């Protein structure tokens, strides 16, 4: 349920209304102040609340029920686009970001070389897996804590904020200096992990599960936001279908759907979404045209010898060329990189 407040109402009166609502209806309140409108989102069991009773208050413009199960991530609660600041770089609304780097951190020299090249090409954040969830237990699982140390060295060398994936609550202390914590597709419904990240004061990049609906993605975001962390970035990274020509089916339609029903930033991963190098550029262009707020691209200094996902990783010269296209497309769409 959302309560829309009249314009030019004193803060004291709004606070009195919030106190009344929490005391008598036992709900939590999410307050959003837009340029012209203040909205109070009532979160909890609102089934028995009479909207007319709240609407009778002199400062209330209107009261509306929200039918969708996701509340905090719902655009009805928060009409304006959320813009998240990551080390001075903003994502959301008119601000676009390119997150690039290797699937796995393999050595300090490798990640620093890649970081320097992707930054020179125009990337604004560095991705790299320190902990790697792999289908086979015999595949490379990542350098773990050592990998995070190498990412931090690459950040020192380039200034790029780092994005890396967490796999377990037990590892959370290792992520204190990580700028954006990524929740991978396999952990999208790891609810205990999501709840813990809700108490973490860091941006969370939440990837859609390979067999999950858009609503399920938003409900996972809700777990994080319900804990008090509103800095959630949604990521479309492809879903599993009957198609065999690509690794996954990149659901570009998810971008405008998410932008319509949620205020959270949306990024697209064309590397995992297709698993094919030559598809990364056209799918990145499609993502930007669809309204995405960023892309996350795998780039490697030697994909043929990559310890994971070399087949979908651009080499650094290819990344240079793709970035030229991305820059033109971002400018055409009226966004800033």
Image: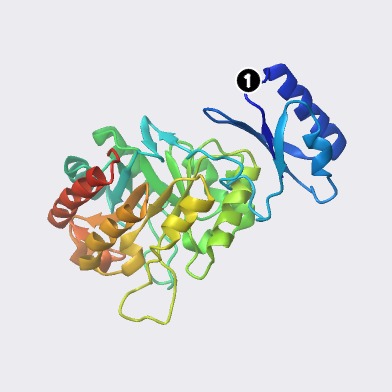
Colour mapping used in the image: rainbow
256 and 99: which is toward the camera: 256
Which image quadrant: the C terminus? Answer: top left
Residue 295 spot, x, y in % from top left? 33, 52
- State the count of labels: 1
Q: Is residue 217 left or right of residue 314?
A: right
Which image quadrant: the N terminus? Answer: top right
Residue at the spot x=31%, y=54% of the render?
A: 289
Residue at the spot x=60%, y=45% of the render?
A: 76
Q: Is residue 126 visible?
A: yes
Q: Is residue 201 left or right of residue 236?
A: right
Q: Quadrant of residue 27?
A: top right
Q: Is residue 105 visible?
A: no
Badge 1 element: loop
156 and 77: which is toward the camera: 77
27 and 88: which is toward the camera: 27
Identify the residue position indicated by label 1 in the image. 8
Residue at the spot x=49%, y=52% of the render?
A: 260
Q: Quadrant of residue 226?
A: top right
Q: Quadrant of residue 23?
A: top right
Residue 164 spot, x, y in % from top left? 40, 49
Residue at the spot x=27%, y=66% of the render?
A: 312
Q: Is residue 241 left or right of residue 246?
A: right
Crowdedness of circle 1 by 10 Å Cα count: few (<14), some, many (20+)? Answer: few
Residue 294 spot, x, y in % from top left? 35, 48
């Amino acid at each position: 349920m959302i309560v829309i407040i009249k314009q030019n109402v004193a803060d004291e009166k709004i606070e009195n209304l919030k106190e009344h609502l929490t005391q008598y209806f036992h709900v939590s309140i999410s307050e959003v102040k837009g340029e012209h409108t203040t909205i109070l989102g009532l979160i909890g069991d609102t089934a028995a609340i009479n909207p007319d009773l709240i609407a009778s208050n002199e400062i209330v413009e209107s009261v509306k029920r929200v039918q969708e199960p996701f509340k905090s991530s719902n655009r009805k609660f928060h009409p304006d686009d959320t813009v998240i600041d990551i080390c001075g770089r903003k994502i959301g609304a008119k601000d676009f970001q390119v997150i690039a780097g290797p699937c796995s951190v393999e050595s300090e020299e490798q990640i620093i070389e890649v970081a320097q090249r992707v930054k020179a090409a125009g990337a604004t954040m560095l991705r790299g897996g320190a902990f790697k969830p792999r289908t086979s237990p015999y595949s490379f699982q990542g350098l773990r804590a050592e990998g995070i140390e190498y990412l931090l060295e690459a950040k020192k060398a380039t200034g790029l904020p780092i994005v890396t994936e967490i796999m377990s609550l037990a590892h959370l202390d290792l992520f204190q200096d990580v700028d954006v914590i990524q929740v991978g597709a396999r952990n999208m419904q790891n609810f205990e992990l999501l709840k813990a990240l809700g108490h973490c004061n860091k941006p969370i990049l939440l990837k859609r599960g390979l067999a999950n609906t858009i609503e399920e993605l938003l409900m996972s975001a809700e777990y994080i936001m319900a804990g008090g962390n509103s800095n959630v970035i949604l990521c479309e990274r492809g879903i599993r279908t009957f198609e065999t020509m690509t690794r996954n089916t990149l659901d570009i339609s998810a971008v405008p759907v998410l932008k319509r029903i949620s205020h959270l930033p949306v990024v697209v991963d064309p590397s995992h979404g297709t698993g094919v190098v030559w598809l990364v550029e056209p799918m990145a262009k499609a993502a930007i045209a669809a309204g995405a707020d960023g892309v996350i691209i795998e780039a490697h200094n030697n994909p043929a010898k990559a310890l994971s996902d070399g087949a979908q990783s651009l080499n650094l010269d290819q990344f240079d060329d793709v970035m030229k296209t991305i820059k033109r497309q971002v400018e055409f769409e009226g966004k800033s990189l």
